[in-house]
Amino acid sequence: MKKEQKTRTENFITSLELPKDVILKDADIHIMGNHEILIENHRGLLLFESEKVIVMTEKVQLIITGRGLSATRFDPDLLHICGILTGIEFRV
């Protein structure tokens, strides 16, 4: 998307007072300390192991590393991971 068009789109979204993440399909990520991560608007999993999880989002792959990682909730648009988080990387 061209910069000018992107700016117009963002201005339009702002004028509607709607959440950007909903309109632009961005992932909404909440990190609680180093033991929980909640990802809304994900697009699925590429890998799920106890020490590494790769989550697809609309724009990036989210790579979560840690120990004892487990999914306490996995819905089509919500993923809740618990364990000891040691790293989070965004790969374009």
Image: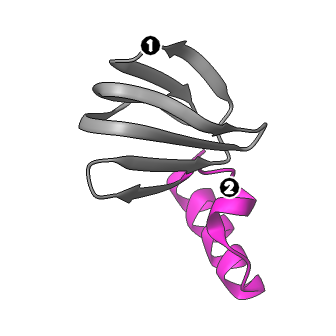
| Crowd tier of the residue under label 2, counting other residues whose Cα lies within 10 Å: few below 14, some 14–19, many 20 or above | few
Which type of secondary structure does the marked residue at label 2 adopt?
Answer: helix
Q: Amino acid at mark 1?
A: Glu
Measuring from the top left, give residue 23's x and y in whole percent: 74, 61
**Horizontal placement of 86 versus 46: left or right?**
left
Q: From this viewpoint, is residue 73 visible? A: yes
Residue that carries the numbered disc 2 in the rendered image: 24
Colour setup of the view: one colour
The image shows residue 3, relative to residue 84, as above or below, that is below
Q: Residue at x 56, y 14 (%)?
A: 46
Residue 58 appears in the figure: no
Residue 3 colored in magenta in the image: yes
Q: Quick one: 62 or 11, which is closer to the camera?
A: 62
Which numbered tag is attached to residue 72? none
Residue numbers of the magenta segment? 1-28
The quadrant of the picture occupied by the C terminus is: top left
Q: Residue pushed farthest left?
A: 86
Residue 49 — which label?
Answer: 1
Indicate which disc, 1 or 2, sits on the residue closer to the N terminus: 2
Looking at the image, which residue is at 72% across and 61% down?
22
Q: Position of residue 40 (x, y in %)?
A: 63, 50
* Residue at x-position 64% and y-position 67%: 20
> Residue type at mark 2?
Leu
Residue 78 in the image: state x and y as whole percent.
68, 45
Q: Quadrant of residue 21?
A: bottom right
Secondary structure at badge 1 equals loop
Residue 13 at x, y = what percent? 70, 74
Q: Is residue 8 above or below residue 40?
A: below
Does the magenta segment cover residue 32?
no
User: What secondary structure predominates along the stretch shown in magenta?
Assistant: helix
Position of the N terminus by quadrant? top right
Which of pointers 1 and 2 indicates the residue nearer the eye? 1
